[in-house]
Image: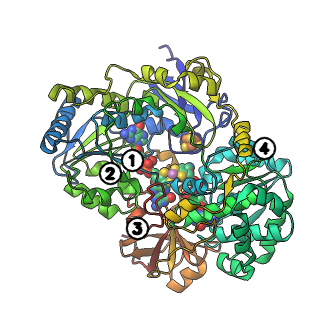
Amino acid sequence: MMEEEVTLYKNVCPRNCFSTCSMITHVKAGKVVKVVGDPSHGFTKGKLCAKGYGYSQYVNSPERLKYPLMQTKRGSGNWQRITWDEAYDIISEKMVALRNRHGSNQSLAYNKFSGNLGLLHFAIEGLFESFGSHTKPVGNPCLGTGRQALKYNLPFEYSPPPEEMAYAKLVVIWGSNPARTNIQQMKFIHAARDQGAKLIVIDPIFTETAKVADMYIQIRPGTDGLLAMGLTKRLVDSALVEEWELRKQISGWDHYADILRNLDMKEVCEETGVCEEAIAELTSLYGTRTPVATWIGYGLQRRKMSVQNVRAIDALVTVSGNRFIKRGGLYYFHPEVENMPLKILKDNNQKNEQNREVNINHFASELLKLDDPPVEFLWIHSRNPLSQDQNIREWDRLMSQLEMVVVSDVTMSHTAKMADIVLPATTQFEEMDLHVSYWNHWLSYNQKAIEPVYEAKSDLQVARELAMKLNEKQPGFSRFPVELEAKDWIEKEVTDEVKENYSIKSWQDLIEKPAHFRSQFEEFQQILKAKPKPFTFFSKKAVEDGLSPFPIYQRDRENANHPFLLLTPQSLLKLHSQFGQVDWFEAYESSFDIKINREVGKQIGVETGDVLVVYNEQGDMEGLVELDASTPKNVVIMNQAGKEPVNALISTRLESYPGKESPELSSPFFDIYVSLRKGGVRR
Ligand SMILES: Nc1nc2c(c(=O)[nH]1)N[C@H]1C(S)=C(S)[C@@H](COP(=O)(O)OP(=O)(O)OC[C@H]3O[C@@H](n4cnc5c(=O)[nH]c(N)nc54)[C@H](O)[C@@H]3O)O[C@H]1N2
Ligand SMILES: Nc1nc2c(c(=O)[nH]1)N[C@H]1C(S)=C(S)[C@@H](COP(=O)(O)OP(=O)(O)OC[C@H]3O[C@@H](n4cnc5c(=O)[nH]c(N)nc54)[C@H](O)[C@@H]3O)O[C@H]1N2
Ligand code: SF4
Ligand SMILES: [Mo]
């Protein structure tokens, strides 16, 4: 028999990850048999992380949802296979009935976050827009806080291309763990070090990145703002920066300088846990090396008061003269998705009606409060809140009160298990798409490599077919342009402006290789020069939001009920709750669920491998504990996702937020306190 030929396709990893890697997919007999990196991508350069190489298992997994399913009693597990037509019928029937009952679409809501970041995945939002006013989430649970913080200090955003980190003479990482979460960036950091740069990692946990750094600073969680202020003070005191220069560039500098003068360095050391010698060394590095690349991590955002910490770090970068110098700069987030036309989302809102917006960080509790009309129908896609959100108990309450819950997903997620109807979603290999990254500046095209597995459909296909069904039931219900296919949307999305920005003639150019955004450096230099004092260290907006006007450290209001801070950072072989279906990883996964300091273990009477119970008002969770010497004594580290999501212990109230009017702050996932006790024998 003739051996089937292998055909190669270009795909993009659509996960919520810094890299948005380009991939080359090997397809044989209509099946993905291998996935490798695409050397034509200038940032990812032909390499993938383990998850990327694991895609041939991800896409072919027996755990994939195959058909639409209906559950007779929510949460009962009593599933029955239905046809797509039946699914659309049941869903559209309910949507039309609710619109007629309330005379509005506002009892229809959706929730989406980051399962697949492809631009055509905005189709479902586009579908809801096409109904007119509905209920939708706003904000960003992950990285909102830092953006808000940076905007207080400087009214425009600039993100340097991350490849430039390779030319920095000093790289300082505050609260990010790229050796785990952004492995592609590590090669640029190593390149910088090969040229004599130093790497400094500031993190309460001795991470994989900390282990390879020249200097590791084990900071007390939540106190980065104070350390940044201490460093800024020392820079000014040691005359490593010119005050007259700062006065010229920064509005409110004299007030800030006064605050710094009164800062007690002994208190800085005590509160941050960082000794004078380390502060002196860091000051000297920030003051004498140029350019310095400072990276504000997302791990830093997951705390209520981190908005002030980020402002203070930004102030340090500005004062040290590194904010806008070539090959230095401040790395946080590249907001390109917002600059894209996003026609699939925006063109469909032809009625221009105001939507009812709900803060995504408090989605479940805020939805429960709504009446006139109450939300009765919820569509969840690219999102697994029952594993990843805070306030899971509020979600349980919400789910039990809704009339209909529809979840579309690739596998039976925790959230899908609580739906009435589950719809099988395609993976990136089964659909066309366009991608930009929130970190690098590349635009890439994702080819359709295989036919949808079983009866899976892309979010776009579902939007088109449901719109048709809705209009059959009630003419004019949706204005979603059902005739447009993925290719048409891609064509529309790559406007003349996009072509100019990425120096391409047509979207087809992207099939050969991804394209890079033009340099924005000069443009921002011009903006800076045109403003007399572009940086503001006195923000009225911050005051309106309930914060200090100055970029100063403000202590978290700690929950004193429990002695340990619970940190649940990202896992190496998972992307939040995804990739559980890749069993290649099982051999590499740690068998431990919880990590604490050895001495704390001794006090509680547990040893590595024992069962430990972690608890607070939300409930308790048990797992196998690992003891080590480097975890801070007041910190407990646990994994995200998993069979029993740790987020069951994570709860905050909207009322307890600083600047609560702003839905743009992140969820304070790392602001959670717990107690510990020895568990019994493993169940
Ligand atoms: N393998 C893998 N990669 C991922 C993801 C994944 O799930 N798995 N998720 C992706 C997503 S959506 C995101 S947002 C990014 C996040 O990636 P990162 O920016 O690396 O953020 P985290 O992993 O949340 O946390 C990073 C570090 O912040 C530290 N930290 C916590 N509190 C503080 C503090 O107060 N001060 C300081 N200085 N450090 C603190 C934690 O100890 C942790 O080591 O990763 C992306 N990449
Ligand atoms: N404790 C704790 N919780 C956290 C964090 C933390 O650090 N600690 N980190 C937070 C952060 S940074 C983030 S970004 C969030 C992430 O929160 P989510 O975006 O909810 O995270 P995922 O687990 O990626 O869930 C997305 C779901 O989308 C599905 N999916 C994938 N592709 C598609 C598709 O094409 N179509 C559809 N319909 N579905 C698809 C996936 O299978 C998965 O079930 O989690 C947050 N939660
Ligand atoms: S998870 Fe991130 S690093 Fe891994 S393949 Fe996807 S984009 Fe690349
Ligand atoms: Mo995130």
At which x and y percent is residue 8? 55, 22
**Is 281 situated left or right of 68 in this image?**
right
Q: Is residue 203 visible?
A: yes
Which mark is first along the chain, 1 or 2?
1
The residue nearer to you, when weighing 100 against 559, is: 100
Alpha carbon distance from label 2 to label 3 = 20 Å
CA separation in Å, label 1 and label 4 = 38 Å
Residue located at (31% from left, 38% from top): 353
Are the two marked residues, 2 and 3, in contact with CB atoms closer than 8 angstroms? no
Task: Give the residue number, with chain letter if any, for mark 4.
Answer: 326
Q: Nearer the viewer, mark 3 or mark 4?
A: 4
Label 2 crowd bin: few (<14), some (14–19), many (20+), radius 10 Å: many
Q: Earlier in the sequence, mark 2 or mark 4?
A: 4
Q: Which residue is mark 2?
A: 415
Amino acid type assigned to the residue bearing label 4 in the image: Lys
Mark nearest the camera among 2 and 1 is: 1
Q: CA distance from mark 2 to mark 1?
A: 8 Å
Tell me, yes or no, whether the two marked residues, 2 and 4, touch with CB atoms within 8 Å: no
Residue 176 occupies which quadrant of the picture? Answer: bottom right
Q: Residues within 10 Å of mark 4 (few under 14, many from 20)?
A: some
> Ligand 2: does it lie within 8 Å of the C-beta at label 3?
no
Which residue is label 3 attached to? 652
Which residue is depicted at the point 70% across and 74% down?
A: 259
State the SS at label 4.
Answer: loop
Q: Sequence order check: which comes first, mark 2 or mark 3?
A: 2
Label 1 beta carbon within 8 A of ligand 2: yes
Instruction: Kindly state the secondary structure of the residue where label 2 is placed.
Output: loop
**Residue at disc 2, CB closer than 8 Å to ligand 2:** yes
Q: What residue does disc 1 label? A: 383
Of circles 1 and 3, which is in front? 3
